[in-house]
Amino acid sequence: MSFFISTKYRTDQEEMMDDFSIGGDLLRDVLDKLENINRWLGGNLVTVNALKKVLKKHPKNIEIVIADIGCGHGDILRDVAKFGRKNGYKMKLIGVDANATAIAYANELSTEYPELVFKTEDIFSDDFKNREFDIVLATLFLHHFKEPQLISFLSDTLKHTKKAIIVNDLHRHKLAYYLFLLLSIFIKNKMIINDGLISVLRGFKRKDLIRISEKINVKPQISWKWAFRFQWIIQK
């Protein structure tokens, strides 16, 4: 990674995490450390707080089906389950990830959450496309894809989603890049450092999200959150 970077355009550089064959103790260590970093920076709350907004008028006696795409080891869904229990919602939570090792680890960590199920699945598969959900969550996931893929995926997913798609993703900004570079001094995992810096450069500017919103014919609901996150609610 060059120290002097431009954030004018999204990078096409791939992350090591994009290789779904990565597994074992390396992946588990990456997932655990990423969870700790996200909690420290308050990232998971961006998703949960958006969910609060979307569910404000939802009757608590009616089950809500929520899918988390690119769920990793399921930390977001466990937070959602805790929120649901605390506030009296009936929830069916489905975690979807293409990495079988991540899904196996998610199952191990979620034995106390019977409302959670996890599936190893490609979000571009017909099986996923033919399912219906009330809400779809995408946390630090959409930046892995190029814009034409995103437009196609979001348009299709919106057809099978009754309430909303909730996106929590990175703001592509030089300061975010350099702050993560500084933070990396304390991270003992080269894969996280490599992928974290690339992730920032694959992230979005507000104008990108507005443009995508227009192309999928929805009114943009975009809020900036610390630490360099966009909360993007796509409602029908």
Image (cartoon, rainbow, N blue to C red):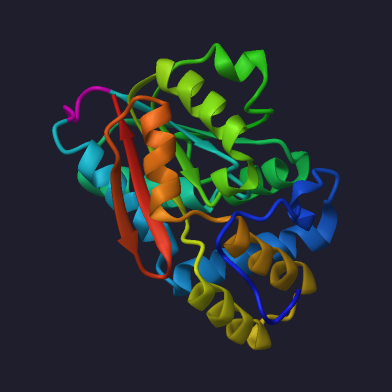
Where does the N terminus fall, quadrant-wise? bottom right
Magenta stretch bounds: 58-62
Query: Looking at the image, which is closer to me, 218 or 98?
Result: 218
Q: At x 75% / y 48%, what residue is drawn?
A: 18
Asked if residue 134 lies in the magenta stretch, the reply is no
How many numbered circles does the render carry?
Answer: 0
| Left-right relation of 69 to 226 | right
Residue 81: x %, y % from top left: 39, 44
Is residue 204 visible to us here? yes
Residue 42, position as x, y percentages in the image: 40, 68
Kindly identify the residue that appears in the image at 34 percent across and 63 percent down. Answer: 225
Give residue 111's position: percent from left, percent from top: 56, 44
Image height of 61 relative to 98, above or below = above
Does 102 appear above or below 148? below
Q: Position of residue 233 (x, y in %)?
A: 32, 40
**Toward the viewer: 233 or 119?**
233
